[in-house]
């Protein structure tokens, strides 16, 4: 995104809100959105989960899932060596099959960005062009409990180090206390901090931590808030809080993204993260995306899976389609 | 390739072990009918499935005699606990053979396998489990100690939920201690005949349940038979009215579950996304072949356009096609005759000035199909707002205030069901109180449960099925 685009989207947000994004204006807007019936939402998600994806569709889906994964390591014990290993897996998910696609991105803590870029070498770039980008979590991930200055510095440093994407967390405490302006302001300012020296911007994923927001109405409001404030992606979870991504929550966020597209023509990405471990589950997400916002969303700049263990299950399912056998865990590399 | 054109995922028919010919199930055995055997076909491709015997008056007589013998000699003397054992056994066998029953139902009826697999058959088992529990507790049904069964129940069921309607009728009848002569619909006898095999497998005493296949004449013979004590019918209002006349003055008790033209009321504060799903489920579930279908959408004028936009784009994602494909959302219309009626009423809708919109979907070359259709700009005086279409056709009307919504919802000769969509709990209660409909769903639609009574007002019939109330229809107080 360029500076003028950012400015335009800010103006549009103000226009939609009908005023400055203070607590009262945001509250009026967010609480004026139609409610969410939990039973109905979960029922719809469950029915999407019963689609039966076979043969050629399944083969396509498995490759697509791999190409949409943000392969993630977010441990206190992460080292450059661990990140190199993760990158090698990202570039070559199935050691025995060079036709296996690469993942979309590797997702690491900010201080590991140089190590990731270094390890990617020439393969570092735009996942829409078959390359692998680097995403950094920022803004005092995962709790978000730090001052705005620290969050901005955290972001700016990761961007300066070459991160292509920033996964920020919202201040859930402020959101739950109804201080919507604080959340809005933080997202908008972090977006500014995503600005690179050349005037372009790193893509901003806004983590709502839906497991802490608790209600679907809150998830819906937080999704709108994140988009209004300038997020490029809305992301379910940090992976550090349970429940992480669920199908109903993701469906709800996709519905918001679809409504935003109807309203403005602009496409926002969605990233369910955490808790998606099997191909079978991931395929349910693909179905939900395709039947809610449309198939065009199934590309790296509009949909991602935040996952680590998912990749190996997909690789093994992929092998099974080729060989007819589901290989043991030792026939795929651990990372 | 497009991902959304999911590769075919057909449920295998190999699980079925069908015979070429089916006789009548009388006195625990299949026997030949003396009427003219008829074919049952698959509405999805018009292919022949099996030949089915037609029960003549003499056959019905034999079935009622078998039921009477079984009642006098076995079933009325058996303790409730023993009867309950049979019902539990039937419920378990239905679960064991669930996939087979689902495939048979989709094949014969045309409904999508995902519905027969996830709705019809699980509910059939649930109905038997639920009423099995009542069999030894009749003293607590509300009729005082030692309530009695009526004796022989004559039951006539429709083609829209063939096996589920069988369960709604047979489970409470047996739990209460009656024996049964049941006539399935002529276009959908298959699952009832497989059910007869299940009764044999369950060792149900001979004659306790008899199944006589045939068309209207067979049904009329069952209803009119002098030795039948209790009549239960689900089907059209016209036939229900004829049955009421036949039964009048005969001393038989009668329950009727007839047509409907349910209002599905969407207020402007509704959870919009789920309301759209509810509208879809309300009228396009089972191709709209549902007596309680939400066929009249009453939407608050202020959100009419938005709801229509969302509804149309949602309908564009529905998949119409092979009922046995696990990804099919909309199956086949059950018969050529029904298709003709749907077409006729839809054409009348257009002539009356309503605006027709049909989802853009490919219609298979063979079989009976009707694409999901919406009529907007419908007025209360239009026939499509008053007559039951019994197909995938939604009539959309608007209202301005809750009072107008209630008035329009009640302005129908029917009164089977209704739906209310709003985020405001107090409005749900206030509106539900004033709707003259037997079942009112709030923020959902077409939900069924064996413990919940179901039935209508006015031309939608009388009596209740399901729950304790459904049991009472098969009992009378101690002498």
Image: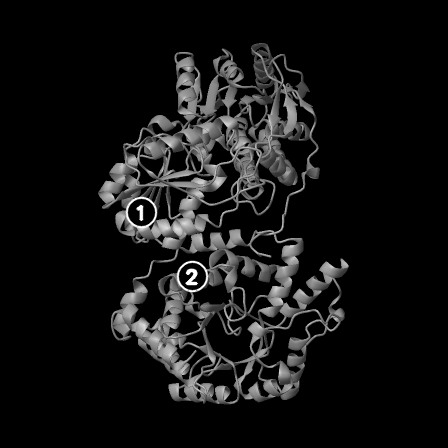
- As drawn, the label of residue A258 is 2
Marks 2/1 same chain: no
Q: Position of residue A168 (x, y in %)?
A: 46, 78
Give the image quarter of residue B252. top left
Residue A277 visible, this angle: no
B262 w.r.t. A145: above or below: above
A320 w.r.t. B452: above or below: below
Determine the CA span between mark 2 and mark 1. 29 Å
Q: Position of residue B84 (x, y in %)?
A: 58, 32
Q: Tag 1: Cα neighbours inside 10 Å, few (<14), some, or many (≥20)?
A: some
Taking depth in this image into account, of B110 and B246 the one nearest to the observer is: B110
Q: How is the image coloured?
A: one colour
Q: Tag 2: Cα neighbours inside 10 Å, few (<14), some, or many (≥20)?
A: some
Residue at position x 46%, y 24% in the image? B233
Q: Position of residue B126 (x, y in %)?
A: 54, 39
Residue designated by label 1 = B428
Q: Position of residue A45 (x, y in %)?
A: 50, 55
Q: Identify the secondary structure beneath mark 2.
A: helix
- The chain ID associated with circle 1 is B
- The chain ID associated with circle 2 is A
């Amino acid at each position: 995104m360029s500076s003028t685009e950012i400015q335009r989207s800010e103006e549009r947000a103000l226009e939609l809100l009908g005023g400055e994004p203070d607590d009262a204006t945001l509250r009026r807007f967010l609480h004026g959105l139609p409610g969410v019936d939990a039973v109905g939402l979960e029922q719809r998600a469950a029915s999407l989960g019963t689609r039966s994806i076979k043969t050629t569709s399944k083969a396509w889906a498995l490759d697509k899932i791999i190409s949409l994964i943000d392969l993630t390591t977010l441990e206190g014990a992460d080292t450059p060596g661990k990140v190199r290993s993760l990158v090698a897996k990202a570039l070559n998910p199935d050691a025995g099959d060079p036709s296996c696609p690469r993942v979309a991105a590797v997702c690491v803590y900010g201080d590991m960005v140089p190590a990731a870029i270094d390890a990617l070498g020439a393969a570092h770039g735009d996942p829409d062009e078959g390359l692998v980008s680097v995403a950094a979590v920022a803004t005092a991930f995962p709790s978000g409990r730090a001052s705005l200055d620290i969050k901005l510095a955290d972001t700016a440093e990761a961007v300066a180090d070459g991160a292509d994407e920033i996964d920020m967390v919202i201040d859930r405490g402020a959101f739950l206390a109804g201080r919507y302006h604080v959340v809005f302001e933080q997202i908008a300012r972090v977006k500014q901090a995503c600005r690179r020296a050349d005037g372009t911007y790193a893509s901003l994923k806004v983590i709502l931590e839906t497991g802490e927001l608790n209600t679907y109405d809150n998830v819906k409001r937080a999704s709108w808030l994140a988009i209004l404030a300038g997020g490029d992606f809305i992301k379910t979870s940090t992976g550090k809080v349970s429940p992480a991504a669920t199908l109903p929550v993701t469906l709800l966020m996709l519905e918001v993204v679809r409504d935003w597209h109807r309203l403005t023509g602009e496409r926002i990405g969605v990233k369910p993260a955490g808790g998606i471990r099997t191909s079978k589950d991931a395929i349910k997400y693909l179905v939900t995306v395709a039947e809610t916002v449309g198939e065009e969303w199934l590309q790296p700049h509009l949909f991602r899976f935040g996952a680590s263990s998912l990749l190996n299950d997909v690789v093994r399912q992929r092998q099974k389609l080729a060989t007819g056998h589901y290989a043991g865990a030792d026939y795929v590399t651990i990372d | 390739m497009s991902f959304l054109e999911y590769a075919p995922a057909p449920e295998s028919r190999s699980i079925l072990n069908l015979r070429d010919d089916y006789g009548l199930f009388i006195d625990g055995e299949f026997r030949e009918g003396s009427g003219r055997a008829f074919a049952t076909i698959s509405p999805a491709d018009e292919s022949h499935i099996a030949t089915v015997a037609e029960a003549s008056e003499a056959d019905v007589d034999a079935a009622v005699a078998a039921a009477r013998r079984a009642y006098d000699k076995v079933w009325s003397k058996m303790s409730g606990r023993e009867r309950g054992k049979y019902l539990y056994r039937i419920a378990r066998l239905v679960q064991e053979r669930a996939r087979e029953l689902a495939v048979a139902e989709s094949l014969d009826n045309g409904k999508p396998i995902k519905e027969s697999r996830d709705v019809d058959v699980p509910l059939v088992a649930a109905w038997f489990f639920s009423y099995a529990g009542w069999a030894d507790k009749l003293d607590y049904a509300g009729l005082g100690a030692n309530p009695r069964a009526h004796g022989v129940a004559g039951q006539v069921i429709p083609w829209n939920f063939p096996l589920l309607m069988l369960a709604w009728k047979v489970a409470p009848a047996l739990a209460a201690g009656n024996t049964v002569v049941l006539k399935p619909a002529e276009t959908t006898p298959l699952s009832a005949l497989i059910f007869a095999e299940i009764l044999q497998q369950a060792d149900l005493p001979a004659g306790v349940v008899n199944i006589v296949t045939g068309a209207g004449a067979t049904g009329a013979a069952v209803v009119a038979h002098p030795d039948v004590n209790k009549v239960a019918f689900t089907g059209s209002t016209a036939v229900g009215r004829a049955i009421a006349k036949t039964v009048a003055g005969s001393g038989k008790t009668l329950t009727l579950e007839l047509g409907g033209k349910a209002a599905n009321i969407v207020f402007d504060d509704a959870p919009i996304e789920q309301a759209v799903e509810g509208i879809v489920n309300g009228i396009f579930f089972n191709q709209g072949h549902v007596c309680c279908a939400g066929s009249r959408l009453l939407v608050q004028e202020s959100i009419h356009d938005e709801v229509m936009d969302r509804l149309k784009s949602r309908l564009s994602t529905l998949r119409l096609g092979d009922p046995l494909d696990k990804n099919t959302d909309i199956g086949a219309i059950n018969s050529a005759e029904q298709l003709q009626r749907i077409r006729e009423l839809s054409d009348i809708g257009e002539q009356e000035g309503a605006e027709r919109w049909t989802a853009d979907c490919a219609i298979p070359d063979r079989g009976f199909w009707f694409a999901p259709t919406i009529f907007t700009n419908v007025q209360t005086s239009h026939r499509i707002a008053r007559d039951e279409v019994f197909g995938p056709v939604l009539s959309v009307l608007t209202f301005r205030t809750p009072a107008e919504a209630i008035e329009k919802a009640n302005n129908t000769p029917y009164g089977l069901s209704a739906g209310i969509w709003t985020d405001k709990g107090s409005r749900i209660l206030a509106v539900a109180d004033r709707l003259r409909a037997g079942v009112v769903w709030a923020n959902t639609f077409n939900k069924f449960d064996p413990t919940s009574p179901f039935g209508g007002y006015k031309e939608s019939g009388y009596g209740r099925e399901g729950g304790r109330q459904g049991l009472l229809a098969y009992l009378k107080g101690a002498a």
